[in-house]
């Protein structure tokens, strides 16, 4: 099913955009030291990393309350990012990056399969 007959709902698109934004922030916080060594500037030093996990878990619950189409899949993406951020110190950088990007695949794949 490559072509969707119905347009993607606005709420789903907004929450997916937030999921992508949180993905970038969480990866940026994890790679803060690498960026500093390479003298690369990002938004990561500005963001308080300790609140990202809680923010992702809050959005996990908010998606379920607002309940756009595909809410369970979107919620799973936020849950995965939140838990990954909480466990960031136990995860290698490459593994962390792959798992964070995999959390972005959950909502679109679930949307296409429904």
Image (spheres, grey):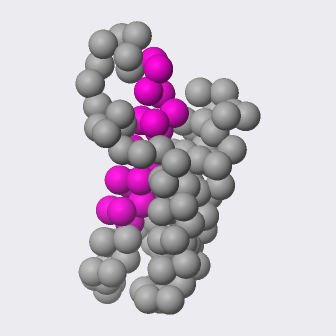
Q: Position of residue 50 (x, y in %)?
A: 52, 48
Of residues 100 and 109, the one drawn nearer to the viewer in this rendering: 100
Of residues 13 and 62, the one drawn nearer to the viewer in this rendering: 62
Vertical relation: 82 (above or below) 26: below
- Examine the rendering and report whether any part of residue 77 can be seen: no
- Would residue 75 appear left or right of 47 to someone viewing this image? right
**Residue positioned 45% across, 18% down in the render:** 34
Q: Position of residue 19 (x, y in %)?
A: 42, 60
**Residue positioned 42% across, 35% down in the render:** 28
**Residue positioned 48% across, 62% down in the render:** 55
- Would residue 79 appear left or right of 66 to someone viewing this image? right
Vertical relation: 78 (above or below) 71: above
Q: Position of residue 88 (x, y in %)?
A: 63, 39
Quarter holding residue 9: bottom left
Of residues 42 and 14, the one drawn nearer to the viewer in this rendering: 42
**Residue positioned 29% across, 31% down in the render:** 42
Q: Is residue 47 magenta?
A: no
Assign the magenta stretch its main secondary structure.
helix
The stretch in magenta equals 16-34
Quarter holding residue 100: top right
Of residues 8 and 10, the one drawn nearer to the viewer in this rendering: 10
Q: Is residue 21 magenta?
A: yes
Vertical relation: 60 (above or below) 20: below
- Examine the rendering and report whether any part of residue 99 can be seen: yes
């Amino acid at each position: 099913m490559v072509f969707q007959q119905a347009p993607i709902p606005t709420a789903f698109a907004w929450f997916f955009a937030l999921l992508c934004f949180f993905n970038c922030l969480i990866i940026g916080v994890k790679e803060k030291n690498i960026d500093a060594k390479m003298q690369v500037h990002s938004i990561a030093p500005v963001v308080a990393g300790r609140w990202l996990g809680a923010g992702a878990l809050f959005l996990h619950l908010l998606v379920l309350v607002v309940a756009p189409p595909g809410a369970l899949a979107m919620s799973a993406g936020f849950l995965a990012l939140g838990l990954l951020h909480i466990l960031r110190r136990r995860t290698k950088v490459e593994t962390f990056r792959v798992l964070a990007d995999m959390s972005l695949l959950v909502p679109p794949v679930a949307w296409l399969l429904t």
